[in-house]
């Protein structure tokens, strides 16, 4: 990206912000509609974006954990436009199209174990929705109509459809919302940082696995259909479970014939240095995987549910499997989205971005942990190219701690943006998941801005008497 503002004359910031008041954004607060002045992002290049005032910013969250190959790739634009001009749409019901079929075959090859069957959907939420509907269908077909309860975890995020929202475990997302009664049972979050003082990480891990087993027994295995888990809880704050946790959870699920669903909407397509993280990072072959985001590197919306041969074969062998799985969308296997996914995978492969994510990811984790010397930083978490810096849950503050935490997140966000960095503020956490193309020098640039942004915030809140370090 050149350092002179490019096409920003196309847009007048105030005019766009005015028009934007008709756009109900995700997690919108109605009382602020009419007064919002969101930053207008007008263009991108690699790991950078530019706003309508010409400011160049590092896109540390890669949009929304999704722009894995980086912004504005010409060959991606070519692949999309060529597909539009060849075939812009075909019905996925009675017919198929070549890009979707080739993509299904590629996903079957790249996914772990026998997850060789792909239901294409529109995003991560509809992937989760489809996993739940498949579990219902599967257990009905097998004559087990009560085996439908779902176990998920506190701090999980599984999407924003009615079903996806029901499975989410972040308390702040539950105000004033309704959920499917009795569908989901929640167990606690496996963040090793929260263990009791006298507990080892291994003991903490055993306790969390036992909690899953106890929940299945309490609800009765006859009533529990699936356990859904993000291998690393992403939007909950990049929470990495203890070693062996996921594998042990899978063993518990197998023991009680409960389907293990890995929600890899964030962790797949290179974010942790592999096509999928379940087996390569965590040693687990799930029964189903939900994915989206990095599948097309965010250039075109698309999601997928991968289902094991074992489940499909069971259905083939039962009479119940003769009834159709009445699920799917107008845009299932959309040829343009499939062409974008194939191009994204080709670029990841050709440019060695999985290796880059592993090598640079390690460097990123090391540099992130250096921020622990700032008194306001209380925890640094992450793995691969996923990281979170949590500020302030110690020391003394004036005012309600939660309000202070929100205020701090907003201040860090503001300072970082002024310095040239977008971080995703989540209460008082800064969340980062940069494009897989990022270099060590760019990581240095990102960390030094983040340090400056946090230190400026810290100086402000000490000067204003909001917080006193311990
Ligand atoms: N599952 C996980 C783990 C996610 O992080 C998200 C979105 O952030 C979703 C599901 C929902 O995906 P989407 O927003 O594409 O519907």
Image (spheres, rainbow, N blue to C red):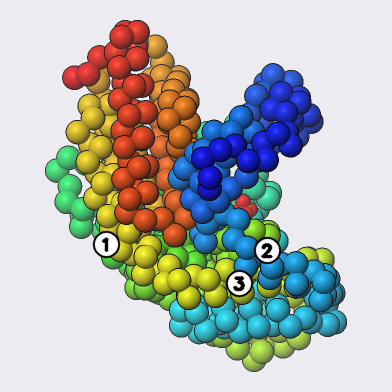
Q: Nearer the viewer, residue 319 or 131?
A: 131
Instruction: Evaluate if marks 2 and 1 touch, with contact meaning CB atoms under 8 Å apart.
Output: no
- The residue located at (36%, 69%) in the rendering is 355
357 relative to 62, above or below: below
Residue placed under numbered mark 1 in the picture: 243
| Distance from the alpha carbon under mark 3 to that under mark 1 | 34 Å
Give coordinates of residue 45: x percent, y percent: 55, 51
Image-quadrant location for residue 353: bottom left
Q: Residue at x 28, y 58 (%)?
A: 362
Q: Which residue is labeled 2 in the image?
A: 77
The vertical placement of 364 against 351, above or below, is: above
Q: Which residue is mark 3?
A: 343
Percent across and percent down for residue 205 are 27, 56
Q: Which mark is residue 86?
A: none
Q: Is residue 248 visible?
A: yes
Foreground: disc 3 or disc 1: 3
Quarter location, residue 19: top right
Distance CA(mark 2)–CA(mark 3): 10 Å
Residue drawn at x 41%, y 69% as measured from the top left: 354
């Amino acid at each position: 990206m050149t350092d002179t503002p490019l096409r920003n004359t196309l847009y007048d910031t105030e005019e766009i912000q005015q028009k934007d008041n008709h756009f109900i954004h995700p997690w919108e607060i109605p009382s602020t509609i009419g007064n919002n002045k969101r930053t207008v992002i007008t263009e991108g290049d690699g790991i950078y974006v530019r706003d309508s005032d010409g400011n160049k910013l590092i896109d540390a969250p890669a949009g929304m954990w999704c722009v894995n190959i980086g912004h504005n790739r010409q060959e991606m634009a070519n692949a999309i436009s060529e597909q539009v001009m060849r075939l812009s749409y075909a019905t996925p019901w009675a017919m198929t199209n070549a890009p979707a079929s080739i993509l299904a075959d590629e996903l079957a090859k790249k996914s772990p174990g026998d997850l060789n069957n792909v239901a294409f959907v529109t995003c991560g939420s509809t992937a989760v929705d489809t996993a739940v509907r498949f579990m219902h269908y599967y257990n009905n077909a097998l004559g087990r109509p009560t085996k439908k309860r779902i176990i998920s975890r506190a701090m999980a995020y599984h999407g924003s459809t009615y079903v996806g929202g029901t499975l989410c475990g972040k308390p702040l997302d539950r105000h004033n919302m309704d959920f499917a009664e009795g569908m989901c049972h929640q167990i606690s979050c496996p963040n090793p940082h929260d263990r009791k003082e006298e507990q080892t990480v291994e003991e903490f891990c055993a306790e969390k696995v036992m909690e899953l087993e106890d929940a299945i027994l309490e609800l009765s295995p006859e009533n529990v259909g699936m356990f859904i888990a993000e291998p690393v809880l992403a939007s909950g704050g990049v929470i990495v479970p203890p070693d062996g946790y996921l594998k042990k959870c899978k063993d518990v699920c197998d023991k009680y014939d409960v389907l293990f669903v890995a929600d890899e909407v964030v962790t797949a397509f290179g974010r942790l240095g592999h096509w999928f993280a379940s087996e390569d990072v965590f040693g687990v072959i799930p029964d189903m995987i939900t994915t989206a985001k990095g599948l097309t590197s965010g250039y075109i919306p698309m999601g997928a549910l991968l289902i094991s041969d074992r489940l499909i074969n069971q259905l083939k062998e039962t009479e119940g499997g003769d009834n159709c799985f009445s699920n799917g969308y107008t845009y299932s296997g959309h040829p343009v989205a499939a062409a974008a996914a194939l191009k994204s995978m080709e670029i990841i492969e050709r440019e060695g971005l999985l290796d880059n994510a592993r090598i640079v990811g390690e460097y990123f984790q090391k540099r992130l942990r250096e921020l622990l010397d700032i008194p306001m930083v209380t925890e640094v978490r992450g793995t691969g190219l996923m990281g979170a810096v949590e500020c302030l849950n110690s020391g003394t503050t004036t005012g309600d701690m939660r309000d202070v935490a929100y205020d701090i997140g907003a201040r860090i966000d503001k300072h970082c943006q002024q310095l040239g960095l977008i971080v995703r503020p989540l209460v008082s956490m800064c969340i980062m998941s940069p494009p897989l193309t990022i270099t060590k020098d760019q990581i240095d640039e990102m960390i030094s801005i983040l340090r400056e942004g946090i230190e400026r915030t810290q100086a402000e809140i000490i000067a204003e008497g909001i917080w006193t370090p311990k």
